[in-house]
Amino acid sequence: MKLLTHNLLSSHVRGVGPRGFPLRLQATEVRINPVEFNPDFVARMIPKVEWAALLEAADTLHLVEVPKGPIEGYEHDEKFLRQMHHVLLEVRTGPSLASLATAG
Amino acid sequence: MALSSSLNRYLLLMAQEHLEFRLPEIKSLLSLFGGQFTSSQETYGKSPFWILSIPSEDIARNLMKRTVCAKSIFELWGHGKSPEELYSSLKNYPVEKMVPFLHSDSTYKIKIHTFNKTLTQEEKVKRIDALEFLPFEGKVNLKKPQHIFSVLEDYGLDPNCIPENPHNIYFGRWIADGQRELIESYSVKKRHFIGNTSMDAGLSFIMANHGKVKENDIVFDPFVGTGGLLIASAHFGAYVYGTDIDYNTVHGLGKASRKNQKWRGPDENIRANLRQYGLEKYYLDVLVSDASKPSWRKGTYFDAIITDPPYGIRESTRRTGSQKEIQKGMEKCPESHVPVSLSYHLSDMFFDLLNFAAETLVLGGRLVYWLPVYTPEYTEEMVPWHPCLKLISNCEQKLSSHTSRRLITMEKVKKFENRDQYSHLLSDHFLPYQGHNSFREKYFSGVTKRIAKEEKSSQE
């Protein structure tokens, strides 16, 4: 799944962080899938991101060049948006599907 | 200076299918583009001719870039119940509004459309000649005119009773056609990956329009199946998520829904469907999940939730349960890898769906879903209700002599506060629908008694 998806998911299974969030990732299989860059969409996603979870995931997966948080005027900052685009939409982790119901 | 009410009136020529779904589609799209639905006639009913006021031509064009219910839109210059009334109406149309399209360096042509009647070429030419009084100064160009004007004659809806004279005649400047060609280009017949219950293309676009889907939205389908509804939203520029409990459908495994195919190959999955239409960039993720216990983070991030939940007929309604619940009842799903399934009562499913929508939709976001009903017992009170969601429309499509499904559109109008606050309130409101838990049984009651008996014993 994409890191944007991971960021929006929690788990109702006990023992997976407070409020069941975030879902633990493993750096078993990380793939990069190029996706067409759409700055407007990425900018819209920034307010929805939970940064602590994103940074933890990026760390677990040994990703580089991950912004530490939203910067001032990010809506027009192409470099920032391209980095976020890569992290949120192009990095794919785990098997292609996450089976959430079977944990525990 | 007050504007005359004859300004900015448009004529929509509607397609004659999915009749009940048309008005909500047009209203939703107008509101999406900043217009408001103002009608210039009492009712629309079954007629394909709709006169309405739209604030600007831009909004009218945007409407046509989305609608699959309307064939064309015209700037209305005149109309009447007879040729004389039409001509007098045209003479009252402000000349200054006509002139920009009639001046000497422009080219034009006039088309005659008749509905429920055929005219000879001679009759058509006579009608065009009768319009000579209009201040046309441009040149006629039948191949590639800059402006197209149309005369539309309405001879009613009954092909067995065609009147001598039309009921209504309209004259207008053609502006744009709708998106009905999408129905053919996205036809399920040509799609790589389908299932038994894949949604008809036309209806999937209608649903996306009822949902007011727009570019850069995030749209979610909790019962994604083969992703047909996601395709429609992606076509309109939304990024899409889906979940489903059916491991096989999501992984592209199991029996093929196409004759002569052995099994669903790697080609047959939702991402492939999007890729088929050049929409792969809008694919976010499709996950196996249990719709009754969503695993999404607390918050509002879906712009629309558009879905066709299982009715328990062709696809079974299931949900995972804990070890304790297994004793109560179990449904056998030999093909599925989902470990534990219980029969998921339909009313519980809608309860969960509405709560989920109330919790995760952005304010103003829409929930669009199908509600199966057993027609002889249906009442409006049965439509599920939620304090945070306002009912926008309820459109019926008949499935059989005693069943139908209703496309329900709701809009989130209030912030969601605390799930427990609502649970006891809601359970009373779902009582009328609980009778429909035996929807499956009622659906089959017309078939044979034996089958009905089998259904009954397999339900808890």
Image (spheres, coloured by chain):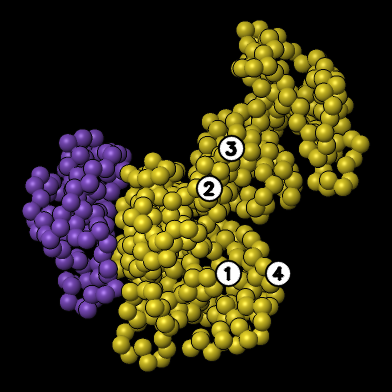
Chain colours: A purple, B yellow
Q: Disc 4 versus disc 1: distance between alpha carbons? A: 13 Å
Q: Disc 3 versus disc 4: distance between alpha carbons? A: 32 Å
> Which residue is painted at 70% across and 33% down in the image?
B5
The earlier-in-sequence mark between 4 and 1 is: 1
Q: Disc 2 versus disc 3: distance between alpha carbons? A: 17 Å
Residue annotated with mark 4: B401
Residue annotated with mark 2: B187
Q: Which mark is residue B372?
A: 1
- Mark 2 vs mark 1, foreground winner is 2
Q: Disc 4 versus disc 2: distance between alpha carbons? A: 26 Å
Residue annotated with mark 3: B178
The residue type indicated by label 3 comes to Gly
- Secondary structure category for the residue under label 4: loop
> Which residue is painted at 61% across and 17% down in the image?
B144
Q: Disc 2 versus disc 1: distance between alpha carbons? A: 24 Å
The earlier-in-sequence mark between 2 and 3 is: 3
- Mark 2 vs mark 3, foreground winner is 2
Q: Quadrant of residue B178?
A: top right
> Which residue is painted at 56% across and 49% down in the image?
B202
Q: Position of residue B209 (x, y in %)?
A: 52, 48
Q: Disc 1 versus disc 3: distance between alpha carbons? A: 29 Å
Q: Residues within 10 Å of mark 3 (few under 14, many from 20)?
A: many
